[in-house]
Image: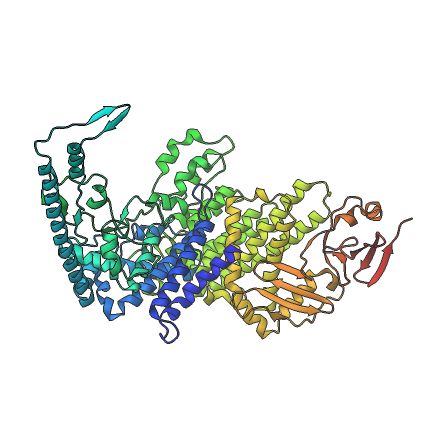
């Protein structure tokens, strides 16, 4: 999927970019390397913005935050590479101006520690270049301190090019002066030849005949002289800026294209009404030969208005009345590059903030958008409180984020007082956004080893606070352990617990890990209970079954999220065959129930986003999964297949020889040959294939057969391919506490249906026949 591809690109940038860009030039020329990176960035940016952001539709704050981090990582890596080059050392003294960047760091949605550390490092790096001595590359390119002006002034080649252009310009100017003098002489000669002659034009038989005098006068008045315009500005700094734009090192051009497109997010190539120098006359003809850049590039030398030459082309001055000065002009184009159109901070904050769409909470959107103290505004809006919502809940919801340092204490109080219904999606959005948003950093009161942690989450570094929160979360899990109706409660507790594990001190990681495992086990139990409920539901209750399947999907996502921690602590959650089997159960559960759900339009934006996040988690853990499977000879895949594939349940074991489909550690496909069947598992998408077929329903030629209708009426079975060709077997077990499976085989030639009833514990088989 596009989500999986983006995650793999982001992982590569995070883990491999620095090594790739700094490797020996023997493998790849420096210019080709940066060109490849520019192309990579453009492809990634277009795909990421299309996936994470929508102009008028819902957005994905977590995904968009990863896009920001990935883009900034590319910019920083290229900048560091260029600063190491002796030709570009002066870049160290130039600013990097990305509007509102320091404020943007505070509103990013970052779930794991590794990304929090990246945010902190990127913030420190770009902060260092915020107020440097010299201007950035995207503004004031003809300033005396601009990088291009300085570089061109030190370049013999560029200075030589300027000299050649000026010599040619002076030659063209003299040619133009001579052209004017010649035209003036021709004009005078023609006008003198008819001096004193009257007009003798006639009109006969409907035709107008022009006399010699008028023809000659018209010929004289039509004499034209071309406008001369100097292609280079008279000002030396401006001329240096122009020649730098024509002949700048390709490395700088690629770097500037990257940073320019990022500044213009989420519309990296905005429309403009500027006039390009190399598309204007006479600059196109005079400067074009000196351009050494690529044929396709983004940031171009432009002017806000046309050149004098193009403006006066349709009506040039007349040699009869105009002096020579009317035909001679200095350069008229403004020296600038395509201006940026950066997004405003409130608009980007909106992209990074989930939107409330429930009518009871929608009017409280402003309380999620900020951590400022807004209680007075909330109280002033009490008249808008829905009748379904208690006044104290309205106030509690609106006050939850008031003060970034108080959010975790407010969360603790929420669980103690049960002041908000955490089974409602709007409340979960509030809590999740509060605990995952970075918030501001402090420069005091925190050790240097934990400086990556922002001020809003410092309380998770206090052991006593973690203890208090564990007690309350554990108590809430006990209260809802047998109640699978409120699946969002489990999502909320899981998200909070994983955030605790991400940040807490190592001395508390064992206790938090126990809570994570408890969340996972409850989720697995709930999935089992709901599956039994679906199995016994009436086949005609489509809406009810779809709702139950959606609950299973959400709970499966919650189980996947229990694996979403940083690499240093992942082994606490993913280190055994049992853990891998649990991961595969959750992934296949999500996949199967999404496929079997007949109403896919009912998925909310929040659920869609955490589903995407769970897919991201699955991609990130694949290297660990691959390592564990290699050590255990893929025992977890055999154990899972024996659980998942119905024909193996009576055997309770499998000894297949699995092979990883690709050497890529982030790829999740594994294949195995079992007897006559070809089995494949995708550990990312949760796809289990038998001869290319996933879980599904029985085909119509079976469900409409007289025997099937007589035995099962309109019951809907979830089936997989069985061991025999063209044979289906029920995924679930039926009767007598799950002791029976059914096999279905339809003979296309005889049009006969064969139904086999298999008893798991006794290995007995009975064929159902008509009577």
Residue 357 seen in render: yes
Question: Going by the picture, which residue comes out furthest to the right?
Answer: 771
Q: Nearer the viewer, residue 284 or 206?
A: 206
Q: Nearer the viewer, residue 283 or 646?
A: 283
On screen, 59 above or below 511? above
Q: Position of residue 142 (x, y in %)?
A: 18, 54
Q: Position of residue 632 (x, y in %)?
A: 60, 73
Q: How is the image coloured?
A: rainbow
Question: Going by the picture, which residue comes out furthest to the front?
Answer: 205
Q: Give the quarter of the figure containing the N terminus.
A: bottom right
Q: Is residue 291 left or right of residue 547?
A: left
On screen, 33 above or below 409? below
On screen, 25 above or below 44? below
Residue found 32% across the figure and 52% down from its top: 263
Q: Position of residue 367 (x, y in %)?
A: 39, 40
Q: Nearer the viewer, residue 638 or 728?
A: 728
Q: Give the quadrant of residue 317.
A: top left
Q: Nearer the viewer, residue 719 or 304?
A: 304
Q: Is residue 545 left or right of residue 140?
A: right
Q: Give the quadrant of residue 71.
A: bottom left
Residue 134 seen in render: no
Residue found 70% across the figure and 40% down from its top: 541
Residue found 69% across the figure and 62% down from its top: 691
Q: Position of residue 86 (x, y in %)?
A: 24, 70
Residue found 44% across the figure and 59% down from its top: 112
Q: How many marks?
A: 0
């Amino acid at each position: 999927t596009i989500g999986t591809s983006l995650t793999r690109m982001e992982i590569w940038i995070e883990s491999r970019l620095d090594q790739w860009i700094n490797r020996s030039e023997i493998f790849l020329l420096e210019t080709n390397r940066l060109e490849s990176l520019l192309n990579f960035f453009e492809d990634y940016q277009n795909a990421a913005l299309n996936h994470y952001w929508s102009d008028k539709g819902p957005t994905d704050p977590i995904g968009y935050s990863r896009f920001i981090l990935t883009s900034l990582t590319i910019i920083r890596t290229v900048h560091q590479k260029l600063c190491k080059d002796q030709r570009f050392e002066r870049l160290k003294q130039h600013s990097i101006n990305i509007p509102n960047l320091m404020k943007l760091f505070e509103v990013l949605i970052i779930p794991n520690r590794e990304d929090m550390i990246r945010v902190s490092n990127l913030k420190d790096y770009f902060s260092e270049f915020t107020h440097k001595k010299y201007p950035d590359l995207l503004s004031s390119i003809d300033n005396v301190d601009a990088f291009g002006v300085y570089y061109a002034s030190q370049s013999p080649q560029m200075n030589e090019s300027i000299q050649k252009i000026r010599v040619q310009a002076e030659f063209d100017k003299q040619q133009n002066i001579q052209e004017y003098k010649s035209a003036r002489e021709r004009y005078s000669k023609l006008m003198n030849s008819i001096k004193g002659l009257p007009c003798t034009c006639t009109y006969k038989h409907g035709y107008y005949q022009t006399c010699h005098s008028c023809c000659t006068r018209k010929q004289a008045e039509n004499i034209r002289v071309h406008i001369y315009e100097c292609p280079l500005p008279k000002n030396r700094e401006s001329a240096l800026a122009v020649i730098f734009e024509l002949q700048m090192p390709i490395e700088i051009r690629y770097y500037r294209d990257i940073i320019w497109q990022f500044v213009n997010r989420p519309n990296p190539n905005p429309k403009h009404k500027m006039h390009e120098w190399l598309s204007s006359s006479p600059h196109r003809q005079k400067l074009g030969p000196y351009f050494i850049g690529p044929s396709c590039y983004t940031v171009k030398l432009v002017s806000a208005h046309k050149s004098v030459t193009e403006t006066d082309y349709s009506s040039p001055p007349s040699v009869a009345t105009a002096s020579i000065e009317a035909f001679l002009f200095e350069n008229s184009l403004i020296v600038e590059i395509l201006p940026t159109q950066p997004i405003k901070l409130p608009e980007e904050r909106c992209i990074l903030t989930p939107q409330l769409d429930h009518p009871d909470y929608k009017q409280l959107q402003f309380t999620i958008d900020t951590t400022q103290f807004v209680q007075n505004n909330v109280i002033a809006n009490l008249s808008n409180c829905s009748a379904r919502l208690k006044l104290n809940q309205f106030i509690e919801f609106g006050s939850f984020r008031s003060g970034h340092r108080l959010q975790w204490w407010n969360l603790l109080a929420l669980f103690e007082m049960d002041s908000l219904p955490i089974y409602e999606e709007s409340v979960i959005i509030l809590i999740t956004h509060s605990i995952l948003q970075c918030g501001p950093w402090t420069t005091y009161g925190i050790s240097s080893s934990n400086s990556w942690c922002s001020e809003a989450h410092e309380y998770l570094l206090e052991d006593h606070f973690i203890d208090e929160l564990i007690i309350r979360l554990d108590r809430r899990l006990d209260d809802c352990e047998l109640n699978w109706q409120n699946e969002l409660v489990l999502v909320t507790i899981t998200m909070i617990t994983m955030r605790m594990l991400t940040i807490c001190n190592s001395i508390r990681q064992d206790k938090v890990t126990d809570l994570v495992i408890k969340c996972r086990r409850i989720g697995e139990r709930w999935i089992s209970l709901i599956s039994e409920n679906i199995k016994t539901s009436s086949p005609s209750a489509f809406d009810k079954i779809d709702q139950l399947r959606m609950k299973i999907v959400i709970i499966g996502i919650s189980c996947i999220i229990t694996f979403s921690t940083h690499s240093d602590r992942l082994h606490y959650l993913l280190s055994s065959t049992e853990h891998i089997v649990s991961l595969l159960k959750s992934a296949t559960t999500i996949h199967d129930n999404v496929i079997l759900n007949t109403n896919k339009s009912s998925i909310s934006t929040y659920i869609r986003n955490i589903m995407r996040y769970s897919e991201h988690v699955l991609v990130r853990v694949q290297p660990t999964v691959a390592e564990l499977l290699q050590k255990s000879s893929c025992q977890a895949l055999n154990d899972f297949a024996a659980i998942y594939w119905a024909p193996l349940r009576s055997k309770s074991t499998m000894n297949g020889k699995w092979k990883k489909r690709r050497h890529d550690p982030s790829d999740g496909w594994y294949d195995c040959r079992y007897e006559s069947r070809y089995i494949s598992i995708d550990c990312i998408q949760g796809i289990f294939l038998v001869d290319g077929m996933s879980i599904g329903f029985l085909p119509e030629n079976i469900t409409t057969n007289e025997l099937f209708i007589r035995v099962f009426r309109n019951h809907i079975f979830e089936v997989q391919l069985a061991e025999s060709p063209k044979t289906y077997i029920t995924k679930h077990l039926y009767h007598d506490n799950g002791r029976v499976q059914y096999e279905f085989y339809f003979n296309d030639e005889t049009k006969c249906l064969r139904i086999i009833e298999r008893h798991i514990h006794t290995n007995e088989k009975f064929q159902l026949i008509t009577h």
